[in-house]
Image (cartoon, helix red, strand yellow):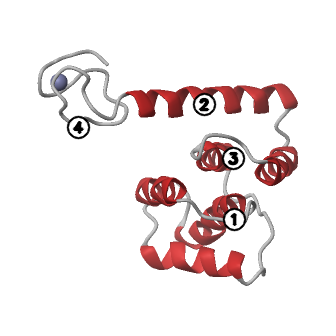
Amino acid sequence: MITKELLVPYLANIVAVIHADGVIQEEETSALESICQRIEAGREDLEEAIRCIAENRFRLTPVGRFSDKVRNLEDMVFVAMKDGNLAKEEKALVLSFAKNIQITQSQFRTIVSETKLKIDLQRSCRVCTQCGASIQADARFCTECGNPC
Ligand SMILES: [Zn+2]
């Protein structure tokens, strides 16, 4: 768990990636919000992170322990790939962050392919194919009818 004062740089790293291709997509925003929930960041932390990036007074800063840095990298990849692909600018940023925290090329490739799998899974499981109920993105079966998804 990252400490309160590290929340803004943690989030700013992710926002920097989203911002790299010049637009913040709706899908990217919702991914960002779920990350905020997970790390218990408030709206003001996210707004401050976005301000830092918009005003161009931030550069990528790995924060916390090694595990936090890796998690941060995973979040960056996840958010960047949410709109379907890793844009060139996004990839450059994420790669430089990975290098900074000494993640190897093959570790990086693993993170990217695992993230892609996770996103595909979430896409395919939003609505139950049998009864149409909306179900948790990562659910293994429908909570309404039990249909595996
Ligand atoms: Zn169902």
Q: Marks 1 and 3, Cα distance to the nearest angstrom?
A: 15 Å
Mark 3 or 4: the one toward you: 4
Sequence-first tag of 2 and 1: 1
Q: Residues within 10 Å of mark 3 (few under 14, many from 20)?
A: many
13 and 54: which is toward the camera? 54
Q: Residue at x 25, y 21 (%)?
A: 141
Give the image location of residue 18, x and y in percent: 66, 59
Sequence-first tag of 2 and 3: 3
Residue 117, placed above or below residue 62: above
Q: Marks 1 and 4, Cα distance to the nearest angstrom?
A: 30 Å
Callouts 3 and 4 close, C-beta under 8 Å:
no
Q: Secondary structure at mark 4?
A: loop
Q: Amino acid at mark 2?
A: Lys
Q: Marks 2 and 3, Cα distance to the nearest angstrom?
A: 14 Å
Q: Amino acid at mark 4?
A: Ser
Residue receiving disc 4: 134
Residue receiving disc 1: 19
Residue receiving disc 2: 116
Q: Is residue 52 left or right of residue 92?
A: left
Can you tell me whether the CB of the residue at mark 2 lies under 8 Å from the nearest atom of ligand 1? no
- The residue lying furthest to the left in this view is 144
Give the image location of residue 31, x and y in percent: 49, 52
Dividing the image into four quarters, tell me where ligand 1 lies.
top left
Q: Amino acid at mark 1?
A: His
Q: Residue at x 72, y 66 (%)?
A: 22
Residue receiving disc 3: 73
